[in-house]
Image (spheres, coloured by chain):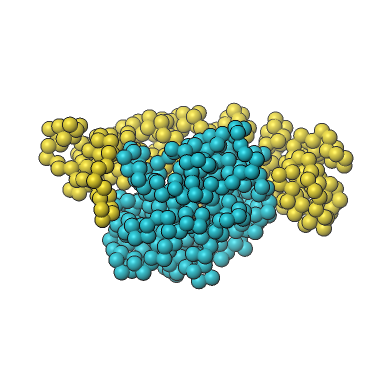
Chain colours: A cyan, B yellow
Amino acid sequence: MSLVSGPGRAQVAGGNLPNELQLAVEKHVKYIQSLDTRKDELEYWLTEHLRLNGVYWGLTALHLLGHPDALPRHETVEFVLSCQHDNGGFGPAPGHDPHMLYTVSAVQILVTVDALDELEKRGKTGREGVGRYIAQLQDRDDGSFAGDEWGETDTRFLFGALNALSLMRLLSYIDVTKAVAYVQACANFDGGYGVSPGAESHAGQIFVCVGALAIADRLDLVDKDRLGSWLSERQLNNGGLNGRPEKLEDVCYSWWVMSSLAMIGKLGWIDKDKLSKFILQCQDPELGGMADRPGDAVDVFHTVFGIAGLSLIGYPGLKPVDPIYCMPLEVVNRAVGR
Amino acid sequence: MGRYSEAEEWADITPIAQNDGGPNPLAAIAYTEEYSEAMGYFRAVTARNENSERVLDLTEHIISMNPAHYTIWLYRANTIFELQQTNGSDLQDDILEELQWLDNLSLKHLKNYQIWHHRQTLMTRLDRIPPTELAFLAQMFAKDAKNYHVWSYRQWLVRRFALWDTELPYTESLLAADVRNNSAWNHRWFVLFGQHVDPRSGKGLDELGHIVDEDLLDREVGYTEDKIRLAPQNQSPWNYLRGLLRKRGSLVECKAFAEEFVGDVEGEGEGCRSSHALDFYADCMAEEKEAEKAGKALELLAKRFDPIRRNYWNYRRGLLGLGAVQA
C-alpha cells in the first residue's frame, strides 16, 4: 500500500460547498485501490518504511466503508508474510528491519482478513513466535516497551504490544501489571498522558495510553471527568479537533480524541454534527481520499482516521469501528472472543 | 551511469537489487535511479556487514534523500561506533563531528523521529553535555517552540545530565516570548516536580510521596496568576494552576483571582474575559456548596461562552443536581 499523497486535494473551506455533504464512499474505495498501482512515483519508494502500516490503514478504511474485498486477500497475506523475520517480528517491507510498529500492523491485518492460520502454517514463525518477539521488547523493570532492539521507548510501543498480543490472545506473555504502572507514570497534571513520564499531554499519546488501560481492563485508573474535559477542549469552532492546546485542527485527531472519549464513555462531550461536517470537508469528493484539513493533499493515513472518526460518531452506512483497536468492531469481537 | 557504479572506490561491490516482496515482482519500476542505485549498494554492504568510511558516506547520501528510513540510521550509528573501535579514534570527537552534521539535517526535517533517536544514541556515549547542545536546541525551538520530538529529547537530556537548575529560567524566557506555549508550561512542571521522580520507578509524578514544598507552591501560584492576567483566555496556565492547587486539595484560595475575569456572573455574563475563569469559579462554588451559583456559571458557559461543549457543561450541572440548559 502506497503512502503517496494526492492526487486529490480536500475541498477548500469557504469554497463552493454543497449544503448536504456526503461521504464519497465509492471514490474512497477507488482511491485506496489505486494506491498500489503508483509504483512509478518516487514518493512510493521513499515511504517504503511505512508500507505495512499503509496496508493496515487502507484495509481498515475499506472494511469500514463496507468493501472488505476491495483488496485481493491472497496478495495481502503474501505481502504481510514476506515482511516477517526469523525472530518473529515484521519489517515494513521485505528487507527492512523488524520493529514493534510493523509487527502490530501485521497482526492487525492478519486478524482483519482472518489469516492467523496462514501465519501458523506459512509464516517464518507462528503466532507464538510473534508473541515472543513482542514480549522480549518489554523492560521487565519498569514495564515499558522498546520499538526494537535499539531500545527507544514510547507509550505507542506499549500500546502496540498490548494491542497485538490481545488480538492473538497471548497477553500472558508480558507483565501487564507493570505496563499499567508505566502508563500511570505518564499521567500529567492536566489529566492527559504523554510519550514518557513528564512529557506533555498529546491526544495521540492519550489514545495509546487509554487504549492500553482499556485492554488491560484498568480504565478505573483514569480520572474520566478531568481527561474528558481536556479532550473535549480539543474541539475548535470550525468543528475540527486539535491534539494539544493552541495547535491547528487535523483529521487524524478526530480519531485519537474521539476514540479516547469513547473508551471513557464521554463521546457526547464534543459536537458531533460540527465534527462530521469538518471531516467531510477534508475529503476530495471527486478523486477520493482525505487530507489533514481542507485544502491540503489527501493521503491514506488521514483517510482511514477520518472514516474511522465518522464511524465512531455513527455516520450512516459505515461499519462500526472498535475504539480501542481501530479495526472493524465485529473483527475485534471475533478475535478477542467478546 | 551511477554515482557508485562508476566509482573506483565501490568497484568491489555488486549491488543487490530490490526484492519487492510479491510472487510477481513488477517488471518496470521507475524508482528514481539515484535512490535505487544507492539502496542497491546499501543492501550489499549490510549483507557483508561492512562498517567503513564509505558506508558513512553512503548512508549520508541515502539519508539526504530519505531521512525517515530507520534501518539506515541504525546501521550508521553502529558503523560510527565500530569504526571508532577499529581506528582507535577519540569517541568524543567522532560524536561531535556527527552532531554537527545532524544539526543541519534536524533544522531541515522538523517532523522526523529517527534524527532524535540517533542523537540520543550518540549522547548516551558521552559523559558531559557538549557545550553547543543547548544552543542548537534553542535554534530548533526558534523554528517550532512546540516540537514534540525536541521536547521529549530535551527532557531526556535534562535527566541524563541533571540540568535542573538552568531549566527553570529557560521556561521563563519561553513563556515571556509566548505565554500560550503549552509545551513550555508542561516543561516547567517537569522541571519543578519531575526532578524527584525516577522515570523507571513506575510511580506517578504526583504520587512519589516527596514532601510538597509550600513555599514553592506559593511562588508558582503567584507566577501563574501573573501570566493569566496577561492573557486570561489561555487554557494552559489555568490547567497548570489547577494542577498546583490539586496538591493542596482545594481551589478556593484562588476564587477571588478567578472573579477578576468572570464579569457579571449573576446576570448575563457581561464583561466576562475568560471561559476558563468561569469554569474555575464554578468549581470553587461547587466546593463551597453554592450549587446555584456554580450552576449559573456553567449555564453561561453552555449558552454563551463555550456552547460547542454544552453537553459537558450540562454534565457538570447534573453533578450538582441541576437540570440541563439549551444552548
Spot the residue most to the bottom. Answer: A337
Q: Residue at horizontal 40%, vertical 52%?
A: A55
In the picture, measured across the screen, residue B90 lies left or right of residue B126, that is: left
Does residue A134 appear left or right of residue A289 in this picture? left
x 56%, y 56%: residue:
A318
Q: Is residue A308 above or below residue B153?
A: below
Relative depth, front residue between B201 and A132: A132
Kindly indicate the quadrant of the structure image that contains residue B222.
top right
The location of residue A75, given as percent across then percent down, is 33, 57
**Which image quarter holds the C terminus of chain B?**
top right
Can residue A87 be seen here? The reply is: yes
**Residue B151 seen by the camera:** no
Would residue B103 be found to the left or right of residue B13 on screen? Answer: right
Q: Position of residue A210 (x, y in %)?
A: 56, 56
Q: How far across and how far down the image is residue B232, in percent?
A: 72, 34
Could you say where residue A164 lies in the image, as x and y percent from the top left?
44, 61
The quarter of the image holding the N terminus of chain B is top left
